[in-house]
Amino acid sequence: MWKIVISVLLLSSFATASFWSACENNAGVAPDDVVSPSCSGSICHGVRGERLIANVTFTPRANHNDLRVQVWATVLGIQIPLPGEPPHDNACNNIFHNNVRQSCPVVGGRQYLWIIEMDIPLTLPALNNARVRYEIWDGDVEVMCASIVAQLL
Ligand SMILES: *[C@@H]1O[C@H](CO)[C@@H](O)[C@H](O)[C@H]1NC(C)=O
């Protein structure tokens, strides 16, 4: 009986393991969904020196005029900031509503698509299971945070 229960639990945890999740200690919203040609199942595959593209849908709680992007990679337990280059350091520059490109402000309660286009720095080490955290900030208010698991080649 316990073997069956444990097998079912294991199977369901494999089935639900996803490459993205909500962030720990996030005051903003989690994404509604994340899809990327580089990601499937429980992991994303990034190549250092190449561009990672991901579609993040999210629904902000409030209106925001500014959506500054802050990306962190956790390497051996240490958070390393990944510098964003304009225009990708501000999500206002790559945001869509109902498939129409728009700019900020975003309106609370509406769903938006933010397309992440990020060049993975060559300075990062090759990693097997790096956790990468994509935060969006309006001043000192955290608007959204997505966490992905990536293998960096
Ligand atoms: C991401 O969104 C763009 C714009 O709507 C779309 O063209 C593209 O197919 C989407 N990518 C994925 C992986 O869904």
Image (cartoon, grey):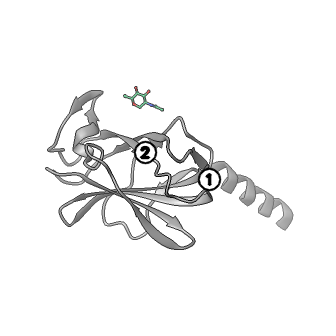
- In the image, residue 60 lies at what x, y percent? 26, 51
Quadrant of the picture in which ligand 1 is shown: top left
Q: Write down the quadrant of residue 40 in the picture.
A: top right
- In the image, residue 91 lies at what x, y percent? 27, 45
Q: Residue at coordinates 45% horizontally, 70% vertically from top-left?
A: 79
CA gap, disc 2 and disc 1: 26 Å
Above or below for 98 versus 108: above
Can residue 16 be spotted in the picture? yes
- In the picture, measured across the screen, residue 25 lies left or right of residue 108, that is right
Q: Residue at coordinates 44% horizontally, 44% vertically from top-left?
A: 33
Q: Quadrant of the N terminus?
A: bottom right
Given residues 57 and 133, the one toward you in this image is 133
For marks 2 and 1, give the one nearer the viewer.
Answer: 2
Q: Write down the quadrant of residue 76 in the picture.
A: bottom right
Q: Which residue is mark 2?
A: 119
Q: Which residue is mark 1?
A: 17
Report the amino acid beneath label 1.
Ala
Taking the view exactly as shown, the residue that stands out farthest to the front is 123
Dot 1: within a 10 Å radius of its alpha carbon, few (fewer than 14), some, or many (20 or more) residues? Answer: few
